[in-house]
Image (cartoon, rainbow, N blue to C red):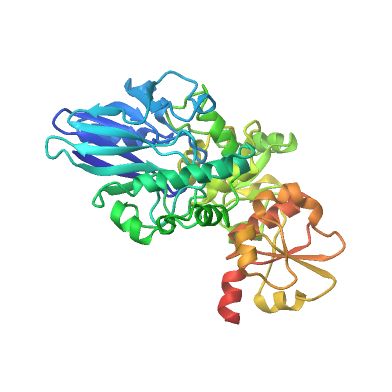
Amino acid sequence: MFFQHVYDKSLAQASYFIGCQAKGEAIVIDAQRDIDVYLEIAKQNNMKITHLTETHIHADYLCGSRELAAVTGAQMYLSDEGGEDWQYQFPHVGLKHGDKISVGNLTLEVLHTPGHTPESISFLLTDHPATDKPVMVFTGDFVFVGDIGRPDLLEKAAGLIGTQEKGAKQMYQSIQRFAELPEYVQVWPAHGAGSACGKALGAVPSSTVGYEKIRNWAFQYENNEAGFIEYLLEGQPEPPKYFAMMKHLNKVDRPLLVEVPKHQKLSKEQFLTAYNDGLKVIDARVKTDFAKGFIPGSINIQGNNSFSTWAGWLLNYQEQFVLVADDNQMEDLTRKLMRIGLDNIYGYISNVEELGLELETEDIIDIEEFKSYIGNPDAQIVDVRGVTEYKTYHIEGADNVFVGTLPDNIDKFSKEKQIVIHCQSGDRATIAQSLLAKYGFKDVKNYSGGMKEWMAVNN
């Protein structure tokens, strides 16, 4: 058996290339949309991708199975479980519980594991002829290392009311069945730490059934379904706004993108025309450079591992936008955006100083100045972290407006008071400050040390 774990740090998303070396055939599970990584693995190992599958209709990224099918001619095998509302609406071979996929000398047995979503399936892999015992299970968003998939996304992100309690009950039953698998079976999930698909995912990429039964909280609720459901549903992070679009695009026919596109570098005149026409500007520079001088109305989303997530919160799928980025950043940023279907890049610029625009700056303050605003009736302190983070611990008197939903909550900011914002360590606060500036709040102070520095000093 050939096995390669492919991991996208920007979305904490795992996919798998598994092959039979004797027959030269391979299957890819939960492919990312920039598919060249799998084509290169196949080429280097003299294998042909013949099978493609997915564990469920994903909410957090645009799955690349159809791109791979278009390029390789491989057959897609997808879940037909979950009822008529959860069927893929494009040609595929349907899978039901107990079905088997043969890839050379390998077999993958389909396990219906609903809970995260109604159609979710896992794959139990056996490597013949070495053994007739299963060696791995690919769990998708069902069982993670140290956590399990959240059942509330369909309700919170896609607006399907009443689905989270039903999903939680299904998850409880699926967990009981999972616990019956041999303890030595390796567990390979679709996500790791940093994903919004759970609340406490481990950073280790894989585990075993036996280890998860010992350490994963979900296996500690035997004969206590109510306690399990309560814990599962509480404290889940806010699902990014783009999740609803991913659910849709992963289910229906959509345009394919089989290569990573190259985008034009705009001249000063091209940029100013687009800018004056109202195109949104996303500045991917590091926050310290952005703070020193930025294009009025631009939004700072740093080009780090969180870039695509925040872009998914703040961009819609109909609008074109311009990036501020270095030439050597553009391929990486394009990949991150195409992985969530944000393909409407109009072009990019690298130097904001050459445009002839009067640049704005951010007012970054230190902890001593920040302290002077605490309890000041003429100041409004706003914590832009998530609700769960805020509830766990926050500075007395601080309001909470999560940065991802800030454009929908602009009325919560006072025009009469000095606004002072912070987050955990400064990244989200610079997004918030740029958004506030875009909405006319120019005199905002940013305590960029955030709760990380505050806790270190005050504990």
Please tell me which residue lies in front, 221 or 188.
Answer: 221
Left or right, 234 with reference to 39: right
Please tell me which residue lies in front, 199 or 380.
Answer: 199
Judged from this view, the residue extending furthest toward the right is 416
Left or right, 107 with reference to 201: left
Residue 171 image position (x, y, % from top left)? 46, 45
Please tell me which residue lies in front, 403 or 177.
Answer: 177
Q: Quadrant of residue 369?
A: bottom right
On the question of residue 328 being in view, the answer is no
Position above or below: 243 against 294? above
Residue 448 image position (x, y, % from top left)? 63, 67
For the N terminus, the quadrant is top left
Q: Quadrant of residue 17?
A: top left
For the C terminus, the quadrant is bottom right
| Number of numbered callouts drawn | 0
Position above or below: 192 against 106? below
Q: Residue at horizontal 58%, vertical 57%?
A: 235
Position above or below: 229 against 15? below
Residue 112 image position (x, y, % from top left)? 39, 35
Judged from this view, the residue extending furthest toward the top is 91
On the question of residue 391 being in view, the answer is yes
